[in-house]
Image (cartoon, rainbow, N blue to C red):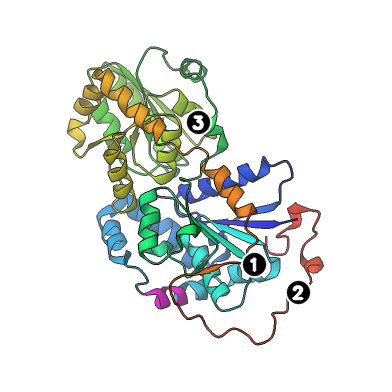
Amino acid sequence: MKRILILSASAGAGHLRAAQAIESELALLPEPPQVIHKDALAFTNLAFKTVYADAYIEMVNTLPGLLGLLYDYADQPWKDEKRRLTIDRLNTRALTRLLYETRPDHVICTHFLPAEIISNLICRGKLKTGLSIVVTDMDIHSMWLCRHYSNYFVALEETREHLKMLGFAPNKVHVTGIPIDPVFSERKDKFEMRQKYGLESDKPTIYMSSGGFGVGKSEEILASLSQMQTPAQVIAMCGRNQALKARLENMRTELESRGNLKIVPVGYSTKVDEYMAASDLVLGKPGGLTTSEALAKGLAFVIVNPIPGQEERNADHLLERGIAIRCNNLPALAYKVDSLLGDEKRLATMQENAALSSSAGAASKIVETVLADDGSQNHLQSNHRCSKLPRKPLKWKPVSDLIQMNNPDNFLSSAS
């Protein structure tokens, strides 16, 4: 039975959600392979994990401009590759041990950190496995570039062309879209969902996204929306940020007293698809996963405060396809949303464009491609020279010492 290891990273919620979507799709197979999903950052030291996860969220909230500058500075193919890889290898030794001990037949990475580590191990003859890399934004940043890989899965044909021009094998780059949970493909009645969550059936409904960690200027956005002339209701998603949810609950009464806006703060939820099904448009940050989920539900997008870098680029693609409008000045937000809701034809066109751009079946396509790949044909990007391969075949520990083959729960028991 094929053993598949899925590696994500808890640096932003999107990488985790993409991995969970693939995991869910694999579980739907009549004869699912042995699958385990791990957060790669759990196999690093505390300081390194803090920089990757906590520091990233802190920068999103307090220094987004600096984050954007760093993003652009680093977006040069193979820039500082050796230095970065040296740092990563020093801090991910536990991840390397995990790979050596478990011997997965194929690894699917939804974050560039584990992908780079595995690519290097393959390159140096230390590991034999298939490697599939799932890019979780519409564009691809240079941090995602790996020398050895079996497959790349990207969101757009433009991204595939980008990789092709960098020397990547076109037949190894698959345009699937960003994987989202299969539940987003299920059709659910808008008015039934509004009734289920205590929403008014006849009011335009706005799904306000702040990402899985509840980042951004949610209070300021709601204060601006409270000036709308059109009666509307806002599903204010707070993710795992309980403090944000409490603040929105506290300011809710005052904002609703201004007249036309109903506010429903929502904490962490596994029913995002149902809240989106109840909505007419998404307002907020165009993260890769949120954007893909919204497209699957045929929702127009009002872009506010995108994170400089990847979300700015996602925003460009949404605007280019006629799916979104953008508000750069919060005092004008109520006016822009009023104008969009007041133009039914324009809103309907944007929603239609969203549905046409959806790639709700991405996870299924990724799974199909991975299962058809025996992992024996990892492609070497360009003419990169790997370290000299060992003269003798690698000697692995017996699988029976580490894995009970008939018990997927024990697939990674020695490293969990």
Q: Residue at x 63, y 63 (%)?
A: 375
Q: Do we see residue 246 in this rendering?
A: no
- Marks counted in the figure total 3
In three-dimensional space, the C-alpha distance between marks 2 and 3, rounded to whole angstroms, equals: 44 Å
Part of the protein shown in magenta? 80-86
- The answer to whether residue 349 is above or below residue 260 is below
Q: Residues within 10 Å of mark 1 (few under 14, many from 20)?
A: some
Inspect the image, locate mark 1, and give the three-letter code of the amino acid beneath it.
Answer: Leu
Give whichever of 55, 106 is nearer the camera. 106
Q: Is residue 85 magenta?
A: yes
Q: Position of 217 compared to 23: left or right?
A: left
Q: Secondary structure at mark 3?
A: helix
Give whichever of 31, 301 is nearer the camera. 31
Residue 273 badge? 3
The quadrant of the rendering that contains the N terminus is: bottom right
Which residue is disc 1 drawn over?
98
Mark 3 or 1, nearer chain start: 1
Q: Position of 142 compared to 21: left or right?
A: left
Q: Residues within 10 Å of mark 3 (few under 14, many from 20)?
A: many
Residue 406 badge? none
Inspect the image, locate mark 3, and give the three-letter code of the amino acid beneath it.
Answer: Asp
Between circles 2 and 1, the one closer to the viewer is: 2
Q: Residue at x 64, y 70 (%)?
A: 128
Query: Which image quadrant for residue 327?
Result: top left
Contact, mark 3 vs mark 1 (Cβ under 8 Å): no
Q: Position of residue 111 (x, y in %)?
A: 48, 57
Which residue is disc 2 drawn over?
397
Mark 2 or 1, nearer chain start: 1
Inspect the image, locate mark 2, and give the three-letter code of the amino acid beneath it.
Answer: Lys
